[in-house]
Image (tube, helix red, strand yellow):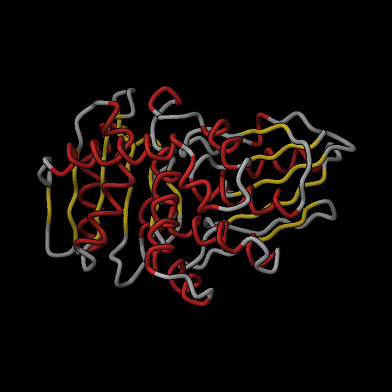
Amino acid sequence: MHYDVFNGDADGLCALHQLRLCEPRDAVLVTGVKRDIALLARVRAGRGDTLAVLDVSLDRNREALAALLARGARVQYFDHHHAASRPSHPALDLHLDTSADTCTGLIVDRFLGGRQRLWAIVAAFGDALPGPAAELGRAMALDAGQLAALRELGDALGYNAYGERESDLVIAPAALYRTLSRHADPFDCRRNEPVIERILATREDDLACARAVLPWAESAGGALYILPDAPWSRRVRGAFGNTRAEADPERAHAILSSDGRDGFVVSVRSPRQSHRGADALCRRYDAGGGRAAAAGIDCLPAADLRRFVADFFAFFG
């Protein structure tokens, strides 16, 4: 058996799509909403089985990865999230780059020698890396209209992954990947897939709701928002953080929404001018992680809210 294990956001989707356009194979798909990243524990692979793992934290899957390797599975792993250490095993092909200006789609792009670079640009746009995305696009002589189309597609793929459960999403991530897999050309996907328009329309409606929410607390260095408990707030958390970071690049931003269990899910965006600090802050908490520019906490207990607020403003000023 072969398993494709991937984050259900733009980066994971596009990273896998690039790989399968160049290396087609039948696979069992293992994915979920963006925060559903402890995915390897679901895979019961052993000797003779293979996995491709894309855009899920190695730290959050370390024990399950070790168990798979011990059972004889072979694993190809691509990721850009912080990892405390890099495991070494003869059956592990690890491609890990935690640089602030990269994403898994760009790592796969390097691995493939740029053979599906348009999809890598979609991944970078969808993972809130407009600078690297535009730079690659200009190197390919794409015009402004083409870049805008790729950005819209990346925004849609990225937006669809946010939610606490698949019922919060416009379309389940595995179904969205199957939709992408019908298109070698991302421009064709953008033009001809109605689900992309549905996601973008939902995003605009949700952002309009979020823009009506005032900061819960703010300072010269950052702004913190607590969104009401509603499906739109669970979807919009990451996109609202990205739009606030673009509009106010000198400050950090934290967006909190209910986790449905008397706590919060947290998205943090570092100041755009530095792209530093989000992961370091979030790793202070048990369910925290991510990358330097954008990170989060999957479950912040309500009792820790005041601590997080104090840490956020002490960290970013």
Q: Is residue 94 left or right of residue 194?
A: right
State which quadrant residue 127 falls in: bottom left
Q: In percent of the image, x 73 and y 37: which residue is there?
A: 3
**For residue 142, above or below residue 279:** below
Please state which of residues 288 and 275 is positioned toward the viewer in this rendering.
275
Which quarter of the figure has residue 198? top left
* Residue 94 image position (x, y, % from top left): 71, 58
Q: Residue at x 60, y 55 (%)?
A: 79
Left or right: 45 in relation to 182: right
Going by the image, does 179 lie left or right of 250? right
* Residue 306 locus on image (x, y percent): 20, 42
Q: Residue at x 52, y 77 (%)?
A: 139
**Residue at horizontal 57 percent and vertical 36 percent from the top:** 179
Q: Residue furthest right?
A: 48
Q: Nearer the viewer, residue 113 or 256?
A: 113
- Residue 35 spot, x, y in % from top left: 46, 38
The quadrant in which the C terminus is found is bottom left
Q: Residue 135's x, y, as percent?
A: 46, 74
- Who is closer to the viewer here, 17 or 89? 17
